[in-house]
Amino acid sequence: MYQLLIMTKKDLHRKRPRTEIPEPTLRRLPRYLHFLQGIWEQGQMNISAPAIARELNYDPTQIVKDLSYTGAVGKPRVGYVTYELIRIIEDFLSLNTKSEAILVGAGNLGSALLSYDNLSGFGIKIIAAFDVAPTKVGTQIGNVSVMHVSRLNELVTRLKVEIGILTTPARIAQEAVDIMVDAKIKAIWNFTPTFLQVPDSVVVQNTSMYANVAILLQRLKELKNKQYGQI
Amino acid sequence: MYQLLIMTKKDLHRKRPRTEIPEPTLRRLPRYLHFLQGIWEQGQMNISAPAIARELNYDPTQIVKDLSYTGAVGKPRVGYVTYELIRIIEDFLSLNTKSEAILVGAGNLGSALLSYDNLSGFGIKIIAAFDVAPTKVGTQIGNVSVMHVSRLNELVTRLKVEIGILTTPARIAQEAVDIMVDAKIKAIWNFTPTFLQVPDSVVVQNTSMYANVAILLQRLKELKNKQYGQI
DNA sequence: TAGATTGTTAATCGATTAACAATC
DNA sequence: TAGATTGTTAATCGATTAACAATC
């Protein structure tokens, strides 16, 4: 009776209700999509979850579960209609409506993203880049103009851009983010190793090269230990 | 009594024993490291798990647990010695011994990685790049020579390179991987959206831009639903 | 000493996997 | 019809979080 009223530490940190799609599912969906596009091009009209599972080396029930999040419905004994499934996943991931984004920090990585055509292939279109270096400002990288950061607020506000890509040096990352937040950017794709301070009304997606290297090196180490036995 | 002998489906798919560090931990460690380097430069000699937790917005016990994997030991009431902790995490993640790597596919993303100085800052040094385009072969990108793929096997075998970075177009990804595996590459960092077929003796780390965009767009969508209520 | 923090063990929570009924 | 596959519910597993004793 009593217990029901006690607010545990957990409650304070509790995540959003439960409309949330599990992150592992979101990671797998683009992989399914890529696979489906491949077989579609080869003219395969239908595809079953077990067939996808065999090809991508996943558990078949996991695929069924992941697909059920998207609202896709399949036929027993036949599977899903390839084309429909592709459309449903694309819709679900909002890959059809290209979201406009700006990029801050036109250095190595920033330039790469600007000239990385593929980026537009999955739902994001970079419409402007910002930097402070006089050598960068005024230039064009991959058809995108690089402007001085002082113009960020005006442009973002005017065009109502919601997504910001952060590729500055770590040292000035928070500063750049503050400017973005000020301009009402709603989602930040963070390529710096910095932990960003943002209000609750802004989402941050961290893509850390560091984390990926760390995992790779560790798995390689584990592989060796396994092979030679842990002496 | 009976049950003990039954081999479930689970057993077949079972992962390596349990020497394995959880992936979430491996993702967080580089973040701790970056934070620690920052406070070390500011002259802070000691740091406690709760203090790290406050700054990085994590649960304090999670930090204690993560750090315990690295073998770091702290003092109650004081915390960890900043410098020691940095060294221990770096050692643990093998970031001190620079591993040599080769890169296949010197396109947009490949070029970016080649000229991305930071990469060498976390344990990986690209010593050669490979491509098939005559316009690329023979050039230098970020101090790394681009050679024809036909030379991959010889060079990798001779220098005993264990890590391969894959940045080719998705279409030829598997082909490139077969060449790497043939040359006894042990770990592949895959930037293509392709599911790679490799023998058990090779580890693959997938870094998918697609997955990251998918998560970002989804979280942004959820954020909006939360704010305006789901009508 | 008192109190903060470590470090370990137990509880909880969420994602994956298994089981199975529905169905084409 | 028989059998493969979907789709849902239950069981399991692993990571996170809580609890708490040890200790500086």
Image (cartoon, coloured by chain):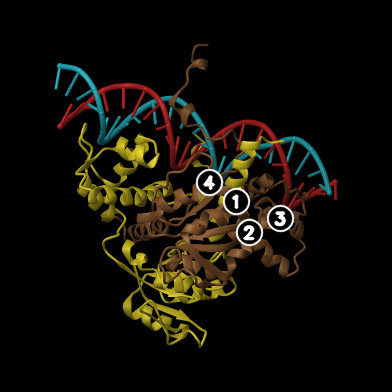
Chain colours: A yellow, B brown, C red, D cyan
Instruction: Mark 3: give few (<14), some (14-19) or many (20+) Cα within 10 Å.
Output: some
Of B137 and A227, the residue lying toward us: B137
Residue highlighted by disc 3: B48
- Badge nearest the viewer, 1 or 4: 1
Say which chain tag 4 marks.
Answer: A
Evaluate whether residue B151 shows in this view. yes
- Residue at (45% x, 57% y) in the render: B191
Instruction: Find the distance from the CA under tag 1 to the CA under tag 3.
Output: 27 Å
Residue highlighted by disc 4: A10
The location of residue A53, given as percent across then percent down, is 35, 38
SS class of the residue under badge 3? loop
Dots 3, 2 in contact, CB < 8 A:
no
- Badge nearest the viewer, 2 or 4: 2
Seen in the picture, residue B184 relative to B149 is either above or below; the reply is above
The location of residue A32, given as percent across then percent down, is 33, 47
Which amino acid type is shown beneath numbered disc 3? Answer: Ser
The location of residue A82, given as percent across then percent down, is 22, 46
Which amino acid type is shown beneath numbered disc 1? Answer: Leu
Which amino acid type is shown beneath numbered disc 2? Answer: Gly
Which amino acid type is shown beneath numbered disc 4? Answer: Lys
Residue highlighted by disc 1: A217
